[in-house]
Amino acid sequence: TDHKLPCLFYIHGGGMMQGSCFYAHYQAFARLIAMRGICVFMVDFRNSLIPGLVGSEGSSGEVAKYPGGLNDCVSGIKFLHSNASSFGVASDKIFLSGESGGGNLCL
């Protein structure tokens, strides 16, 4: 189908020091949004203090000083925008959101 979905690029909270998009509450949040017909992408950026879920699928478990996590988020949004059509996403309807440190990284 040619119908492209709007997309939420969500950045998890944790003061840019801890947390992971693989935490159950972020996964549940993404499912609730997706049930409304909005595609959801989340980036498990490198935290500055405590690694994400080490050993979980997709999480690197790496730690990086600022701006490492910011750079991960920028790379993620660039990747999504460049590949939007292959994901069925409308590239002109991608919006960013996050909470706490994730909200700060959206700026």
Image: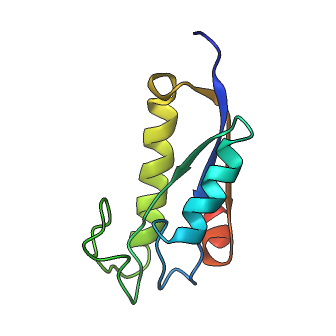
Residue sitting at x 47%, y 84%: 18
Rendered residue at 45%/50% (across/down): 76
Q: Quadrant of residue 55?
A: bottom left
Compared to residue 73, the image places residue 41 above or below, namely above
Relative to 48, 31 lies left or right: right
Q: Is residue 7 visible?
A: yes
Side of 68 where 15 appears, left or right:
right
**Residue 45 sits above or below residue 51 on the image:** above
Where is residue 72? Give x, y as percent. 41, 61
Q: Measuring 43% from the left and 70% from the top, which residue is drawn there?
A: 69
- Quarter holding the C terminus? bottom right
Instruction: Say left or right for 59 vs 76.
Output: left
Q: Which picture quadrant has residue 29? A: bottom right
Q: Which residue is nearer to you in this view: 33 or 41?
A: 33
Q: Position of residue 44 (x, y in %)?
A: 43, 64
Q: Position of residue 12 (x, y in %)?
A: 57, 69
